[in-house]
């Protein structure tokens, strides 16, 4: 195995063509430098220099070896610099799991934009997965950060989490609907509507929580149609096929023909959690985690 220090010494002597000047440049004595060059030649079984009393010159093989040694030392310097940047979290890669809601709400895009402003060299890989698969990805260390609808248990031995969003729900109605401009909306009026439900792949618990919140607000929704995600439900509302509730953060993504109304007394919210492994091996993961929590907090 080549000794990088010996290569560094060799390059200095080759460039100076003088052991004394090379020794001054390297801040060492001439004798140790001459021994290091002799040891390198012995290790390589190659004569690198033609020596005379007047000067020291590279052999033909020495010139060939010099070009490769300079390239290797340059790469070694770059590698060391890269390691330092990785250690500071300036470069590297992140594998992030997310739900579509994390993207639609702006939580994930805002955090990625903030990260990119300070660390544009970071490579990001995004994986749209259900919460359960994301948490398993954290345990297997195939994901660095997960954005999930339900956090890991408080006593989870591997994972930690922080809530990054707890979005109130708005009532979405067709623009020409009688309730779109009403001064107030009563529970009886809500009960009389055709509701468009949003099926949740995550768990039946969210649907049950929604129904319970409706009951607490004084009505039971008649669900006549179901969509697989909120933006699809808004498209059905725009077509005049019913009403639905969507997260407040999706207000700006409502299509033309949809009116949003607040629902006083409606307690149902859509939460979003950031989760990560307790054993954090890379500064970049910690940096993005802090960025995610900060940007989500600033957007509330």
Image: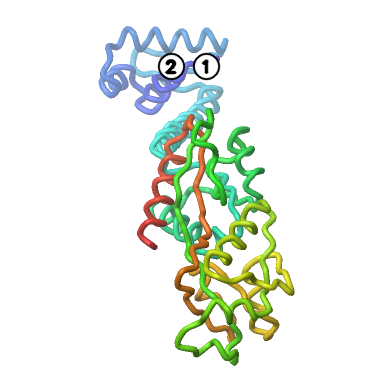
In this rendered view, identify the residue nearer to me: 258 or 185: 185
* Residue where numbered disc 2 is placed: 6
229 vs 280: above or below: below
* Residue where numbered disc 1 is placed: 2
Q: Would residue 108 appear left or right of 202 to someone viewing this image?
A: left
Q: In the image, what residue occupies the spot 51% across and 39% down?
A: 276
Label 1 crowding class (10 Å Cα cut-off): few <14, some 14-19, many 20+?
few
Instruction: Give residue 95's mark.
Output: none
Q: In the image, what residue occupies the spot 50% across and 67% down?
A: 266
Residue 280 on image: x %, y %: 47, 32
In this rendered view, identify the residue nearer to me: 72 or 211: 211
Residue 157 on image: x %, y %: 53, 28
Residue 98 on image: x %, y %: 58, 52
| Distance CA(mark 1)–CA(mark 2) | 8 Å
Label 2 crowding class (10 Å Cα cut-off): few <14, some 14-19, many 20+?
some
250 vs 286: above or below: below
Quarter occupied by residue 214? bottom right
Quarter occupied by residue 36? top left
250 vs 83: above or below: below
Q: What is the secondary structure assignment of the residue under circle 2? A: helix
Q: Which quadrant of the rendered structure holds the C terminus?
A: bottom left
Residue 35 on image: x %, y %: 39, 7
In this rendered view, identify the residue nearer to me: 61 or 54: 61
Q: In the image, what residue occupies the spot 59% across and 57% down?
A: 209
145 vs 57: above or below: below
Count of marks overlaid on the render: 2
Q: Does the residue at mark 1 contact the one at mark 2 (Cβ under 8 Å)? A: yes
Q: In the image, what residue occupies the spot 60% across and 40% down?
A: 135
């Amino acid at each position: 195995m080549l000794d990088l220090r010996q290569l560094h010494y060799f390059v200095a002597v080759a460039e100076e063509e003088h052991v004394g000047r090379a020794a001054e440049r390297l801040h060492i004595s001439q004798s140790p430098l001459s021994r290091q060059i002799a040891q390198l030649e012995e290790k390589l079984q190659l004569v690198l220099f033609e020596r005379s009393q007047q000067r020291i010159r590279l052999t033909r093989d020495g010139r060939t070896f010099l070009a490769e040694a300079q390239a290797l030392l340059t790469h070694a310097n770059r590698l060391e610099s890269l390691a330092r940047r990785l250690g500071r979290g300036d470069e590297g890669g992140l594998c992030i799991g997310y739900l579509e809601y994390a993207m639609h709400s702006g939580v994930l895009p805002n955090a990625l934009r903030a990260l990119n402003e300070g660390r544009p060299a970071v490579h990001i890989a995004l994986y749209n997965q259900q919460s359960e698969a994301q948490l398993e990805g954290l345990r297997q260390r195939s994901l660095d950060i997960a954005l999930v609808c339900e956090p890991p248990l408080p006593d989870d031995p591997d994972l930690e989490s922080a809530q990054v969003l707890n979005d109130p729900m708005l009532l979405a109605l067709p623009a020409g609907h009688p309730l779109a401009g009403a001064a107030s909306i009563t529970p009886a009026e809500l009960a009389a509507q055709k509701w468009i439900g949003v099926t949740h792949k995550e768990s039946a618990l969210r649907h049950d929580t929604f129904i319970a919140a409706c009951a607490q607000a004084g009505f039971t929704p008649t669900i006549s149609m179901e969509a697989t995600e909120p933006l699809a439900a808004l498209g059905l509302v725009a077509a005049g096929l019913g009403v639905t509730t969507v997260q407040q953060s999706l207000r700006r993504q409502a299509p033309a023909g949809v009116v949003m109304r607040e629902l006083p007394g409606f307690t149902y919210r859509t939460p979003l959690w950031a989760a990560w492994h307790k054993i954090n091996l890379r500064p970049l993961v910690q940096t993005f985690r802090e960025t995610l929590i900060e940007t989500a907090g600033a957007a509330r």
